[in-house]
Image (tube, rainbow, N blue to C red):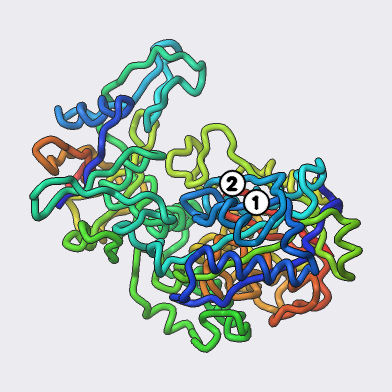
Amino acid sequence: MIRREVAIVGIGQTAYAKALPGTAWELAIEAILAALADAGIDPKDVDGLCRFAPPFETVSEPQLVRALGIRELTFFAESPLGGEALGAVIAHAAAAVKARLASTVVVYRALSQSKGGRFGRADGRGPGGAAPATATAGADPNPHVVVAEEDNRSFAWPYGLMSPGQLFALWARRYAIVNRLTDEDLTQALGAIAITQRRYANNNPNAMMRDRKMDADDYRNARMISEPLRLFDLCLENDGACAYVVTGAETARALRDDPVYLLSATQTISPYREPMGIYVTGELLELFPPATAARLFADAGVGRTDIDLAEFYDATSYMPLRSLESYGFVPDGQAWRYVTETGTGPDSPLPVNTHGGHLSEAYLHGMNGVLEAVRQLRGTASNQVADPEIALVGAPAGSAMILAR
Amino acid sequence: MAIIPAATDLTRPYWDGARHGKLVVQRCNNCANHWHPPLPGCPHCHSTDLGWQQVSGTGTVYTYTVVRHATHAALAGHIPYVIAIVELTEGPRIVTGITGCDPRDVRAGMEVRVRFEAVTDDVTLPYFEPASP
């Protein structure tokens, strides 16, 4: 159990944009130095690094040890599965600090889609920046694309299931099927999330969509990408980096008056499941078992009504919708109605993705949601929730954390 | 230009089956469970005495999406197309495409049957089409 024994003492980020001049390495350094400056920690004193595993995170530990002048890195760990590493990376940092394997752990995520390939394209680079499908050699002017077997990809790509957005469209359609929603019901629900998040972004100076208003007509009239998902149901593709610094609670209190404590963190893969869910033997919508959410809250020692805001990983608008149910804020099958009637805006019982999320701030594999939760708990967010004490940051398949001031 | 799977020792019987007009899934010779995609051992009893079982090729649409935006140059000429997860009558689910009907006519729960399509001289993919036209 982690409850309040470690804290986030510094956060840092780069600008977010469709294309930034720096490499992912340069962006990582910029974000990490900003986080360490925010914490008041000398970069030489960093002794731990936690990151998203390749192929997602391309900036390596040795690159950062050299660039930052770290004296000795005593702990480093990588977590797989893209956005589902979100809770794992901080769990590893916290475990390392508690076990005294390291005292000052930096967690980072740097992304240069302008140089490394857009996640929405499968030619050039694969889903999530994974290895490309390779063209056959030889003189054939129109070669076939041969898909190597890796994580069942050779059973999916030949049918044109090649990008995350298409996969999440299968999830969203399943949600409509199970809950007997009409296309109009689902459009209303997904649109409510996309539009609410855009409004948050319109008041967030960091957001790529700060100056781009979107109303219901804009949402509906956008082109269909992979039914039922339209253009604005899908996240942005961008460059940028985020970092935060984890230390023991006592160190954190010595460094600043407003550390943000980690109450609990979860990572999960349960039997016969896989995070993307295609081949689960049970219900596709149950990407993680209720026991995981129960453990997240029990370890934190808080209940659902104690949570003041949530930052849900949103590669698509469907994910926050279902996460409201998976994490237990709304009963199964009711979030579609909840988001249209109660909503997730600034005056709702549970504001969600107050920075605009991946749909409208920027896409950083959930890390910008962690930074937003820290700003909210410090009281320095641009869409500040009134006096929040506890925040949840979570990905759709159960990788999550609960933070408190 | 087709998008084709590179078979491994583990997956080759599936693709060989398709080339011969048979839809097969891996099964455990010890406890008789079956599953898809293939695994090195049985996830239930952990036996490595595994075989392949031909299935009926019928099933229902579990979920689907009509893709209207190509994410790979090889797909540019195929838009719109339908990706589906089909639940086989025997239980396992497979990722496939639905052909043989207008994409707008695909529905959840629709009964479908396998339809083998040779995409190259060497590779045949199992697609599905409506069981009743």
Residue A249 seen in render: yes
Q: Nearer the viewer, residue A271 or B61?
A: A271
For the point 40% across and 54% down, the residue is A127
Disc 2 designates what residue?
Answer: A79
Is the Cβ of the residue at disc 2 closer than 8 Å to that at disc 1? yes
Disc 1 designates what residue?
Answer: A50
Callout 1 secondary element: strand
Q: Position of residue A196 (x, y in %)?
A: 58, 77
Q: Is residue A285 above or below residue B123?
A: below
Q: Position of residue B21 (x, y in %)?
A: 16, 30
Q: Nearer the viewer, residue B79 or B121?
A: B121
For the point 32% across and 45% down, the residue is A156
Q: CA distance from mark 2 to mark 1?
A: 8 Å
Chain at tag 2: A
Residue type highlighted by circle 2: Ser
Callout 2 secondary element: strand
Q: Nearer the viewer, residue A394 or A100?
A: A100
The label shown at residue A151 is: none
Residue type highlighted by circle 1: Cys
Q: Position of residue A75 (x, y in %)?
A: 70, 45
Left or right: A214, with A369 as reference point: left
